[in-house]
Each structure stands twice: as C-alpha cells, then as structure tokens.
Image (cartoon, rainbow, N blue to C red):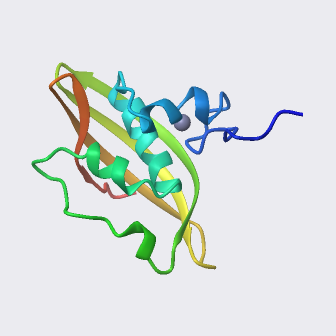
Amino acid sequence: MQAIDTLTPCPCGNVAGYARCCGPFHDGAVAPTAEMLMRSRYSAYVLKREDYLLATWHPSTRPAHLKLAAQQPAPTWLGLDVKYHEEDGEHATVEFVARLRYGGGKAQRMHEISRFVRDGGCWYYLDGRFPES
Ligand SMILES: [Zn+2]
C-alpha cells in the first residue's frame, strides 16, 4: 500500500490532490495564474506555511509577520470556493469565500475580493476587501 504522503484532496479542494495542485507552488514553482496563487495561499493558511504567505505577498503591502502559529483560538479551515477570477495584464482580481471555524465556534464565511499584481513574472497578493454579503 502506498504511503499517504500527499493530501487528497488538496487543502484548496482540488480532488487532484496536493502534489498535483498547491504543493509544487509551496515548493517554489511559479503559479501561472492569480487564481492558482490564491488557491495555494489558502492551502498555505491551512498548512500554516507563513513563509509562503509572506513570500507571495507583494512587498508594498506585506506585513512583517502573521504569527499564524501563535493564533488563539486557532482557525480550522473548512473549505474554499473561488467565485470569480479576472486577469487584466499585470493585475488580477479573485473573489472567494473561505469557510473557517475558530476553536469550537460556529463555522463562518470569509468573503473577500483580493487584488493581485504580477511583478517580475510572479503573481503576488496585494490586498483584499470584504464586500457586504
Ligand atoms: Zn490546491
């Protein structure tokens, strides 16, 4: 029996599995689209890959740290739905709903419209806003 060394489905929800989805980006591959970068950043939140989240955050808006490991109560990420994705040259917008729960609390929706920018051939998260929903 094959060792379970990959996550299937991928934390972002892709049934192809982590090794065929977000894993390569976490290992250094360049995400070809802003949507794929966004999915890989969601997976990075699930896996607490703060290094990856900071590396894919544009330097102009990047925080010094996220302190994911120290977050209390820790969020449990429940799923991702990408609602909309638009690329226009070096800029892109991705609208998504992530579901999460803090500690033993109720599941909540995080609805965000994120902006991405391509700089030097790589996509970066720029910022996000939370529409009324
Ligand atoms: Zn994925």
Residue 63 spot, x, y in % from top left: 20, 60
Q: Which residue corresponds to the image point at 36% horizontal and 47% vertical from the top-left?
A: 52
What is the total number of numbered labels drawn onto the structure image?
Answer: 0
- Give the vertical position of 97 relative to 86 (above or below): below
Q: Which residue corresponds to the image point at 15% horizontal and 25% vertical from the top-left?
A: 120
- Give the vertical position of 70 relative to 18 (above or below): below
Relative to the observer, which residue lies in front, 128 or 123?
A: 123
Q: Is residue 67 left or right of residue 116?
A: right
The residue furthest right is 1
Residue 13 spot, x, y in % from top left: 61, 40
Q: Quadrant of residue 124?
A: top left
Q: Quadrant of residue 131?
A: bottom left
Residue 7 spot, x, y in % from top left: 67, 41
Q: Which residue corresponds to the image point at 35% horizontal and 70% vertical from the top-left?
A: 67
On-image quarter of the C terminus: bottom left
The residue furthest left is 60
Q: Is residue 99 left or right of residue 16?
A: left
Q: Quadrant of ligand 1?
A: top right
Q: Which residue corresponds to the image point at 60% horizontal and 31% vertical from the top-left?
A: 19
On-image quarter of the N terminus: top right
Relative to the observer, which residue lies in front, 116 or 69?
A: 69
Residue 36 spot, x, y in % from top left: 42, 30
Q: Quadrant of residue 55?
A: top left
